[in-house]
Amino acid sequence: MAFRILVTDEVDQEGVALLTEVPEFQVDVIPTTPEAELLSRIDDYHAIVGRSATKITEKLLQAGTKLRVVGRAGVGVDNVAMDAATKLGIAVINAPAGNTVAVAELFFAVLIGLLRHVPRADTTMHEGKWERSHLLGSEIKDRTLGIVGVGRIGGEVATRARAFGMTVVGYDPYIAQERFDGLHVRRCATLDALLLEADVVTVHTPLTDETRGMIGAPQLARLRAGAVVCNLARGGIVDEPALAYALRSGQLHGAVVDAYTREPLPADHPFRSAPNMLLTPHIGASTDQGQRNVAVDACAAVRDALLNEEYSRSLNVAAAGGDWQALQPAMLLVRRAAAVARAMLADRGARAISSISLRLGPELAPGRGPLLAAAALGALEGVVERERLNIINARAVAASRDIDVQYAEAGTP
């Protein structure tokens, strides 16, 4: 089967080459596509690959009746209507590892730049001044760094922080203790506990309903006097008016921000007049290596999804886990077993199945996300009249029909 792929934004050519070299692919590269034109063209494509500038709205997804995959050459997917994509059976794939080093390095560049007054020093020198006596700075050695979100980027930051002689504490309710131990990061049980202890707080989480506004005025008030707050993740995680006020009131020593709720940052935004604040225009991933890495990662994942239905990198296959290829036999078995159960209960009508419970041994437990999706798919095939019923949306469709799909460890009643 031939597939058409639309590449928008400025995606690195090394990544695009992974698509153009595939005989089954026809690739159109249109770096800047107005929304109206995109809507009129999208129905011709099976996949779209872009960066943050292209907004993948629910309206666009519904217009793309052939769409199978959305590829994001980067980490954040807040420009993608994720719920709509899942319901429509469209895989959403990002590149979470490609720019981790770039963001981690920028964090230390701007943190040290802030504490050593580098921007001001450079500006005054270019103005012909020599203000050495006014540029007394601070060191980061022996400071306590609090990392909110100890994932890929948070881990890279932690490793480098220890090399600088910092004490590192972290908060992340979704990361195993083994990772904290491996990074030599002391775990804080709550966000408040981290805020009370840290001299510098840096945020490295995605923007979700849970993290939106997670550091607001009450949280900033818990920080010790002279603390520094850094947000190089996504705009909206730190309450922007509250952060600007904390700087003006002298509650905080300084702040660094690279991502904003509105981008470009409005001219009248309170950050622009806040004291001791270092601002950068969302350049965390903007390195040659970072852009190449995310493009290669995203395009390779889109290629594999289209050619082989390889969805291990999909964000909406119920948190795909485990080794996707190694799970294929088990997924097929589960899917067929669910289909057999559905056939056996066919005489009970369309609502014969109300719940599916999947018991897995320890060797398969890491892959429970894809396996649960496979069970839902097997139970629904032949029953649901839906053009796009697949591994991506099977659990969402099951939930819409009040079918509870759940996991239980082997040996539980």
Image: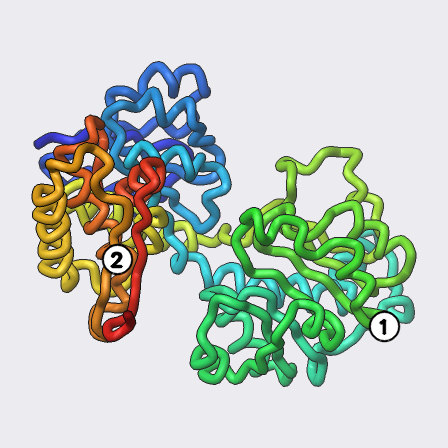
Would you identify the image quadrant in which residue 162 lies?
bottom right
Label 1, on which residue? Answer: 136
Label 2, on which residue? Answer: 357
* Residue 312 x, y percent position in the rendering: 26, 55
Q: Which amino acid does label 1 sit on?
A: Leu
Q: Which residue sits at x=64%, y=51%?
A: 237
Query: Distance between the Cα atoms at labels 1 and 2?
Result: 63 Å
Q: Which residue sits at x=75%, y=59%?
A: 255
Location of residue 317 with respect to 175 vertically, above or below: above
Which one is closest to the eye, mark 1 or mark 2?
A: 2
Q: Which residue sits at x=49%, y=64%?
A: 153
Secondary element type, mark 1: loop
Side (left or right) of 193 relative to 400: right
Count residues near mark 1 (Cα–Cα under 10 Å), then give few for <14, some for 14-19, many for 20+. Answer: few
Q: Nearer the viewer, residue 13 or 24?
A: 24
Location of residue 10 with respect to 41 vertically, above or below: below
* Residue 340 x, y percent position in the rendering: 8, 48
Secondary element type, mark 2: strand
